[in-house]
Image (tube, grey):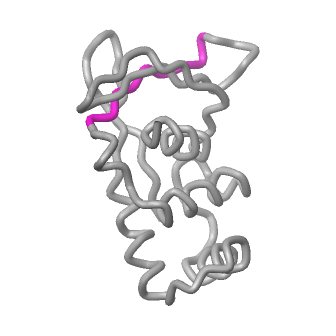
Amino acid sequence: MKRKRFLSEFLGALGVVKINFTDETNDKICGTAFYSLDDFEESQDFVWHLTEEQVPNDDILKITELLNVEKMLDIDKIILSRDKLYQKFNSKYNSLLSFDEFILLLDELETIKVTMIDEGVETDCFFIHE
């Protein structure tokens, strides 16, 4: 359940409007990400090789949710400075994180990769960066 929630926010921030989860085992979750409800050809299969226990923590989920809801990405790049993103995060979540703690979380978010699948083969990946 944590994987699905995180993927919904993470892929949503990257422009995905709907996800069909197709397979879920202890060590991976698979699905199809759709970029348009009007054109189901605009889709991408994916697999995330992660257990429920390995899902990023709630603060990273909150950063991802903020990026998604506020549409703060240009394709996969964060469009705000670290300072402004930190201010928005603190404002929205009444966070007590220091700037340095926030930056560590942001750095961890930028290491997350969700593998794309093309014609049954793992190829590129979804990611977020500055």
- Classify residue 35 as left or right of residue 106: right
Observer-nearest of 95 and 103: 95
Majority secondary structure of the magenta segment?
Answer: strand
Q: From the viewer's perspective, is residue 41 above or below residue 7?
A: above
Quadrant of the rendered image containing residue 103: bottom left
| Residue nearer the viewer, 31 or 2 | 2
Side of 83 relative to 116 (left or right)? right
Residue 110 appears at what percent x and percent y?
39, 60
Question: How many callouts does the rendering have?
Answer: 0
Which portion, as a residue range, is magenta?
A: 41-49
Is residue 68 toward the left or the right of residue 55 in the image? Answer: right
The residue at the point 67 percent across, 72 percent down is 93
Q: Position of residue 5 (x, y in %)?
A: 53, 41
User: Residue, x 28% and y 27% (percent of image)?
Assistant: 123
- Residue displayed at 38% across by 76% down: 104
Image x and y of residue 23, in percent: 37, 17
